[in-house]
Image (spheres, rainbow, N blue to C red):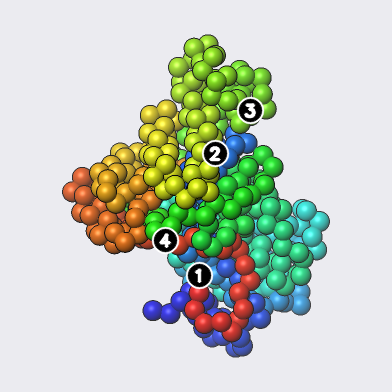
Amino acid sequence: MSSLKERVIAQFISRFGERPSHIVRAPGRVNLIGEHTDYNDGFVLPMAIDRAIWIALRPRSDRRVLLHSLDLEPAADFSLDDVQHTAGDWTEYVKGMAWALQGAGLVLQGWEGVSAGDIPVGAGLSSSAALELAVARAFAAVTGFAWEPAQMARLAQLAENKWVGVNCGIMDQMISAAGKAGHALLIDCRTLETSLAPLPPETAVVIMDTATRRGLVDSAYNERRAQCEAAARFFQVPALRDVDLATFNAHANELDELTRRRARHVISENQRTIEAMAAMLQQDAVTLGKLINASHASLRDDFEVSSKELNQIVECAQRRETVCLGARMTGAGFGGCAIALVRDVSAKAFAAAVTACYQAASGLQPHIYICQAADGASEVPREQKGD
Ligand code: GLA
């Protein structure tokens, strides 16, 4: 099968009659630990994955943007002088990105191209952030403005919050913009400072897609955000990031039961994320795995964003103790994917065992892939073969 890069080039040539002048890509992500901490100004530890959205393009001399997707209808087709909401489909991400870049004062040039991707939609692997960053990279390629990952991530988040209307944090956009091959990234979501976290040697990260898609995620997500804000008000701090475990424990019984559990998740998860970073710097995969397991329990019991199927697949993984160092749901929750950190020599056998176990437990066919940590959004040389 040809690579996505080859596919977008071939489709570009058949549509526009010449080779594209630029090829850009932006990846999806998994989060190793630090879940529902980003909108609390906290820490996250995601990695960009080797699944991405690719665009082959050439500049236009006018201010029109025309993007044909090989996966989705209709084409995005609009003028930079008149960016309007339309049907609420995938093209809103393209227009929203143009709106955000122009709102930041960048004078954009039009372009036309073809896109394709291999990030499953709605699985919690951030296909929408990847699309936003790929579009931003396309504008940077034809317009020539400097690529500053944190600025681009903030603008992509703005597009998602204000144009598309999804109240997400900064994690997905930041890792798609700034990821580094072979590494996860510790991101301080208050300052957007990043530190490289090398993946432990002889381990692999396995994505376990439950084949369930999140329902009601937006309303539940907004409800969790409101509960976290209420807890921050109680502690009289700007965000839960500013409360440590000792302070929390000293006052926990003054909070109502639900707010207490929500806050306990966020505050303990921040602590686990810092500890996970330290473990990664020491190449201590065993400690990292334990923290990953503890994160899942906290998301399941205190934050209540897991689901029956996510719990089933995580239990299937965790039961393989000699291979699996740790497993947890990843992303917003309520469906989609979990991850496992496993010993790499046994990763394939692990995938087969989890597939059988999850099928028996849920009656569903999971999709399991061993993934690699990839670079963030980039322009790719046109000549290079393959991804
Ligand atoms: C979604 C959001 C992120 C983050 C995660 C939960 O992926 O887009 O900003 O809040 O949920 O950690």
Q: Is residue 63 above or below residue 126?
A: below
Q: Residue at x 53, y 43 (%)?
A: 278
Q: Residue at x 53, y 44 (%)?
A: 277
**Label 4: few (<14), some (14–19) or many (≥20) C-alpha neighbours in 10 Å:** some
Q: Is residue 179 left or right of residue 358?
A: right
Choose mark 2 or mark 3, whichever is in front: 2
Q: What SS does tag 1 mark?
A: strand
Residue 9 is drawn in which quadrant? bottom right
Q: Is residue 101 left or right of residue 334?
A: right
Please tell me which of labels 2 and 4 falls first in the chain: 2
Q: Position of residue 78 (x, y in %)?
A: 67, 65
**Label 2: few (<14), some (14–19) or many (≥20) C-alpha neighbours in 10 Å:** some
- Residue bearing the label numbered 2: 274
Q: Judge: label 2 CB < 8 Å from ligand 1.
A: no
- Residue bearing the label numbered 1: 116
Please tell me which of labels 1 and 4 falls first in the chain: 1
Amino acid bearing label 3: Asp
Amino acid bearing label 4: Cys
Q: What SS does tag 4 mark?
A: strand
Q: Is residue 51 left or right of residue 225?
A: left
User: Is residue 66 in sight in this rendering?
Assistant: no
**Label 1: few (<14), some (14–19) or many (≥20) C-alpha neighbours in 10 Å:** many
Please tell me which of labels 3 and 1 falls first in the chain: 1
- Residue bearing the label numbered 3: 242
